[in-house]
Amino acid sequence: MKKDKIIFWTATIIIALFEGVMPALTSQTELAKEGVRHLGYPEYFGNALVIFKILGVLTLVIVPIPKRIKEWAYAGFAFDFIFATISQGAVDGVNGQTFFPLIVLGILSVSYIYYHKVYSKHM
């Protein structure tokens, strides 16, 4: 059980850093705004995405939040990573950067699997 908790929290903290902390700290930089424009999205979309990412991360890391809400957060992040891969591939063609969101999706999957191993029995 302890090993499962360590795996869950390690994966979840990586997601929290990539999807919550980094976007919160960098979303208003010119580089981030240019990244959103480069993919063809309006600036307000990038701002909304950051808000939802922060809310999703909070949902994942606050243990007492109901399981059903956590499921929505996991699904939202999965869609985000899948569509990020599609956007990168459509705009820049297929390259190494195209698949980075799928690597993060893999980490999210580990968090999801171990969330159920650790916490579903207690809820």
Image (cartoon, grey):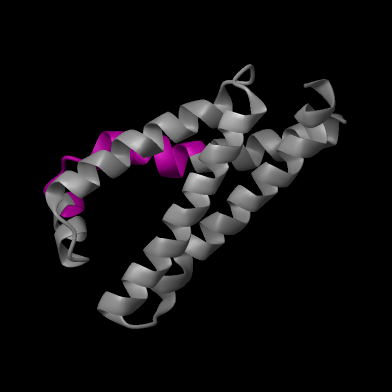
Q: Is residue 121 above or below residue 46?
A: above
Q: Nearer the viewer, residue 91 or 69?
A: 69
**Residue farthest right in this picture:** 1
What kind of secondary structure does the magenta stretch mostly adopt? helix
Residue 112 in the image: above or below residue 39: above
Q: Is residue 84 above or below residue 50?
A: below
**Percent position (x, y) of residue 99?**
47, 70
Magenta region includes residue 25: yes
Residue depicted at 82% across the width and 21% down the height: 122
Identity of the residue drawn at 76% across and 37% down: 116
Would residue 119 appear left or right of 82 to someone viewing this image? Answer: right
Location of residue 22 in the rendering, given as x and y in whole percent from the top left corner? 35, 40
Where residue 121 sits, quadrant-wise, is top right
Tell me where residue 97 appears, x and y as whole percent: 39, 71
Residue farthest to the front, as pictured = 68
**Left-right relation of 101 to 26:** right
Residue at image point 48% right, 46% down: 76
Q: Residue furthest top?
A: 64
Counting the numbered discs, the total is 0
Q: Quadrant of the C terminus?
A: top right
Quadrant occupied by the N terminus: top right
Q: Position of residue 106 (x, y in %)?
A: 61, 58
Residue 20 lies, with reference to residue 59, above or below; the image says below
Residue at position x 73%, y 46% from top?
A: 113
Q: Is residue 63 left or right of residue 29?
A: right
Q: 122 or 2: which is nearer to us?
A: 122
Q: Which residues are magenta?
A: 16-32
Q: Nearer the viewer, residue 106 or 72?
A: 72
Q: Is residue 111 magenta?
A: no
